[in-house]
Amino acid sequence: MNRTFRALLAGGSAVTAAALLASCGVLGGKPKRIAIAYTNDVRGEIRSCGCATHDLGGLGRRATFLRVFRDTTQADVLLVDAGDFFSASINYGKEKAELTMKSMAHMNYDGLVPGENEFGFGADYFRTRAREIGLPVLAVNLADAASDSLLFAPSRVVTLKSGLRAGLIGVVSVALKFPPQVQPGSLEIRDPAVAVQAEVDALRPNVDVVVVLSHMGRSEVNQFAQLLKGVDVIVNGHDGLPVRQVKRWGEPYVVQVAAKGMYVGVATGSISKEKRVVRLTNDVVGLDKSYGDDEAIAKLFNAYDMEVVAREKAALPTHAVTTFAGADACQACHAPIFEKWKSTGHAHAFERLASQNRHFDRDCTPCHTTGFFKQGGFVNASATPHLTNVQCEACHGNGAVHAKDPAQKTDMVAKGTCRTCHTAEQTPEFEFNTFWARIDHGGMGASTAGSR
């Protein structure tokens, strides 16, 4: 699937692309075919960071893929999300939430079910803004306890390009744990199977296919699926683990793609004369660099970046008390090491962020600065300019005492810090000896050098 779209975006014609897609089993003639493009557990990953070796994901790339897919496939396309598109991180602010919702509205999602992360700014905020932005949020069993009324629409019917009618139902787990911004007891979660089955029974006479968007654990959704009649496909989210093998649990197929928005799942099947989805296949598309950012979403990102920069400049102090020494303090005794460091990517890490106006993004700055989130460490480029980039103390620990008295060692062993930023996700090919050799400076410094 990925190779197909790379060929298309490299300049292949729509006819060629269609032929390639047909060879993948994505296109279909008669009987009617439906392609369910789905996401789940994006968790606030609004764009690829650009640092990872296998650079995947991002709202802009997702929009480009969906546009091309819709333009070239002959199948009816349904676009859905199974929740947790917001992040639970303390660094995930309302600016990112707004950007996420506006981007998803631009992509014309047909239905979404909320996860617990969507309530990180309170139920009223998400419900109000989702409605104003135009997101079709669905939840058949999530109610306001005070009014005894559903928080969102329980379902909707979408008429696709061929005239095929798809019924969508959203449902959440009874085990959902809301964040502290939701007052305990203010929301009621009703029995998922009872609520969904009643909605299916009401929809089935008037639709050709029924798709349930669920937000629940893997074992729970498998048991839940076996209780339902008349449901064709369940798109699930919550634990962020992909379904490796598409299979039926009772009547419905259950599908789920990996977390953090690096992939889009595409589940494709035929519609039988009995109005049931049959022969479902599942493809996973990695959103790599071959998918350029959608122009409209790129504009949203530009506005977002400018807003964050302006807000942070206004709110953050221009002076800060810092206890980290900075690389310049190390230079006097460790000149050869200092010069080697200057030739590494570590010495230019902050410049990379600043060139993209992302130097105030707290999802990025910890791995591009020294001592961020640590007492006396990096605050911002104005208050602590001497702590930009990944300097000596990022690996060796606070060196202020060592700088004053070389006999006093630093408090961290450098070799134990690499995986803090070079995670399995960011640098999957990380192999310590190979990577260490690129920055190894053993024997280059004075005898008073700190621990390595």
Image (cartoon, rainbow, N blue to C red):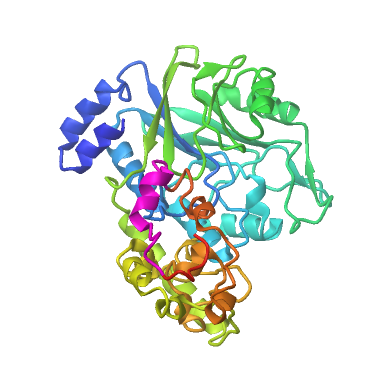
**Residue reaching furthest top?**
273
Occupied quadrant, residue 323: bottom right
The answer to whether residue 390 is left or right of residue 149 is left
* Range shown magenta: 427-445
Q: Position of residue 326 (x, y in %)?
A: 48, 77
The count of marks equals: 0
Residue at image location 42% in from the left, 74% down from the top: 306
Residue 318 percent location from the top left of the image: 53, 87
Does the magenta-highlighted stretch encompass residue 436? Answer: yes
Residue, x 16% and y 31% (percent of image)? 16
Image position of 5 (left or right of 78): left
Q: Quadrant of residue 233?
A: top right
Residue 172 appears left or right of 14? right
Answer whether residue 52 is visible to the viewer in this image.
no
- Could you tell me which residue is drawn at 32 percent across and 37 percent down? 69
* Residue positioned most to the front: 447
* Res. 215 in view: yes
Q: Nearer the viewer, residue 28 or 377?
A: 377
Position of 243 relative to 438 (above/below): above
Residue 130, given in percent of the width and then of the height, sits at 58, 55
Magenta-colored stretch includes residue 406: no
Residue at left offset 72%, top offset 31%: 192
Question: On the rendered image, what quadrant is the N terminus found in?
Answer: top left
Query: In the rendering, at what x and y percent does residue 212 appear?
Result: 59, 30
Indicate the quadrant where residue 65 lies.
top left
Is residue 137 depicted above or below 103 in this figure?
A: above
The answer to which of 66 and 168 lies nearer the viewer is 66
